[in-house]
């Protein structure tokens, strides 16, 4: 069963990767002088990591699923 | 769980095209692992200190449950142009009541606890790469955790693609106050790979794949009927996509996460945030999140044994199953979160933010009518206030 789950996750990831790459081709990846908008704070994946850590900690303690955003941090007795 | 990092970029002006190489590295910043600046391959050239007060409370009909007040502080310190150190500390002050099986009010037990956690991360920056080492510590009167993490990221020659890899391990010791077990252990190892791609001048996408392997004590010692496997493997795929609208200068941030574990839980999470600048100084960000999970294979519905009664599962008196749990967090349900964040960029050095979210879990929100029966609706509210100062 675990293998099936891993296979499914890999498939989803590969699908997303292919979609991203395909979109990237269609969207024209930016030249060096075109990255001003991408550098905006709100375009970063974790614009406020302290906020995200707090929120993810709550979900970690109240839901079964967790993780995916990065490794490390350790456990706690809340789950 | 990670409590690291801070609003590094809250008051930081967005670098312009003069620094073209950093985009995907910045986007790859992970909670507690990387620095969320827009120039992550370079050491930050200024420090940031952030203080937040975070609050949480939850309830179900007829029962006010848990309240948490959590002051936290974060410091980012650049060193010698090629290094940075981050340190975080948080204290959770927890009180209230929690059901000992399903959502039974009569079975709720009162509790009070204090959790102290600290986290230190050292990052070394290279031309198109960065390597970080992190140590995390968390201590409660009945639970202690020590964790180490190592991650690295590398960008392509055109800096439109960044690859990341991370490894982590944690060692936890569990000593519940009811002495149900003594000096129990849990060991968890994690591995992650990821790629971030600048799709266009307004689109940034990220894909992460994570595998987690855990061994040891996964029971909740405060639940009356809880016997879980001593092995838990998790697989997680995450896709994130941010899009900037040039017409109105707003940003749409979206993500989808697929989760699967060896307990039988399969979950889907979708998040959408819309960052709307009201002026140069004020930004509002409404957000919504949907989550749904399939129950663990050993979770049992509130149908109890006819001989010995609640809270034991039907058939328990004749032949107890190997694994069983009445923890509602392992049931099938759906959940929505709605909220909004407000930021006030006071000047170039100071900023303040406020955030409020409302969360609710319902069995009926599981798609296809597959939610677990007999559970009360669960609601929670989260609030945060923070202030940041660059130096």
Image (cartoon, coloured by chain):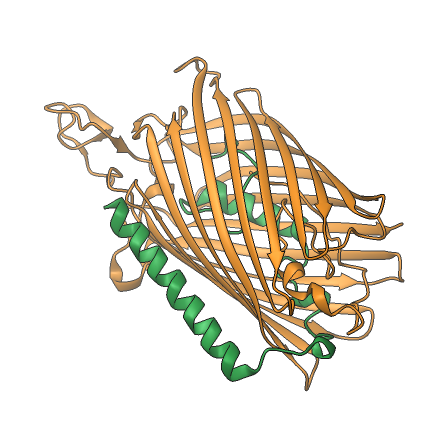
Q: Residue furthest left?
A: B318
Query: Does any portion of residue B74 appear in the rendered image?
Result: no
Shade representing chain A: green
Closest to the observer, B203 or B180: B203
Shade representing chain B: orange
Q: Residue at x 66, y 53 (%)?
A: B129
Closest to the observer, B229 or B324: B229
Question: Where on the picture, by quarter, is residue A15?
Answer: bottom left
Q: Residue at x 30, y 27 (%)?
A: B225
What is the x, y in percent for residue B217?
A: 38, 25
Image check: B227 left or right of B284?
left
Query: Does any portion of residue B89 appear in the rendered image?
Result: yes
Q: Quadrant of the N terminus of chain B?
A: top right
What is the x, y in percent for residue A26?
A: 50, 83
Image check: B48 left or right of A22?
right
Closest to the observer, B321 or B100: B321
């Amino acid at each position: 069963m675990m293998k099936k789950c891993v296979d499914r996750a890999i498939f989803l990831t590969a699908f997303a990767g292919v979609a991203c790459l395909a979109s990237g081709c269609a969207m024209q990846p930016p030249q060096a002088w075109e990255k001003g908008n991408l550098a905006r704070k709100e375009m970063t994946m974790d614009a406020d990591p302290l906020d995200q850590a707090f929120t993810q900690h709550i979900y970690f303690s109240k839901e079964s699923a967790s993780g995916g955003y990065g490794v490390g941090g350790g456990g706690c007795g809340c789950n | 769980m990670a409590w690291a990092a801070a609003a590094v970029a809250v008051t930081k002006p967005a670098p312009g095209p003069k620094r073209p190489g950093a985009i995907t590295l910045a986007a790859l910043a992970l909670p507690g692992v990387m620095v969320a600046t827009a120039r992550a391959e370079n050491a930050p050239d200024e420090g940031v200190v952030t203080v937040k007060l975070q609050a949480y409370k939850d309830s179900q009909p007829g029962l006010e449950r848990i309240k948490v007040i959590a002051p936290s502080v974060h410091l980012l310190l650049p060193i010698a142009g090629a290094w940075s150190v981050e340190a975080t500390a948080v204290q959770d002050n927890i009180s209230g009541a929690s059901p000992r099986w399903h959502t039974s009010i009569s079975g709720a037990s009162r509790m009070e606890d204090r959790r102290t956690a600290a986290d230190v991360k050292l990052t070394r920056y290279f031309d198109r790469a960065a390597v970080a080492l992190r140590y995390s510590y968390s201590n409660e009167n009945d639970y202690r955790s020590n964790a180490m993490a190592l991650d690295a990221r590398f960008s392509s020659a055109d800096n439109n693609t960044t690859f990341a890899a991370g490894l982590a391990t944690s060692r936890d010791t569990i000593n519940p106050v009811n002495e149900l077990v003594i000096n129990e252990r849990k060991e968890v190892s994690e591995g992650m790979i990821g790629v971030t791609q600048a799709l266009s001048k307004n689109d940034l996408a990220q894909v992460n794949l994570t595998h987690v392997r855990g061994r040891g004590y996964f029971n909740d010692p405060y639940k009356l009927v809880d016997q879980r496997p001593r092995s838990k493997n998790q697989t997680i795929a995450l896709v994130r996509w941010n899009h900037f609208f040039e017409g109105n200068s707003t940003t749409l941030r979206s993500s989808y996460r697929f989760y699967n574990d060896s307990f039988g839980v399969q979950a889907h999470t979708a998040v959408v945030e819309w960052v709307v600048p009201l002026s140069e100084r004020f930004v509002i960000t409404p957000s919504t999140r949907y989550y749904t999970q399939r129950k663990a294979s050993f979770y049992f519905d509130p149908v109890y044994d006819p001989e010995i009664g609640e809270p034991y599962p039907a058939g328990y008196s004749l032949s107890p199953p190997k694994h069983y749990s009445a923890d509602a967090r392992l049931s099938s349900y759906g959940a929505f979160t709605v909220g909004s964040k407000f930021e006030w960029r006071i000047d170039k050095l100071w900023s303040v933010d406020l955030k409020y979210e409302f969360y609710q879990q319902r069995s009926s929100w599981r798609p296809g009518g597959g939610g677990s029966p007999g559970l009360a609706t669960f609601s929670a509210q989260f609030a945060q206030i923070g202030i940041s100062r660059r130096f």
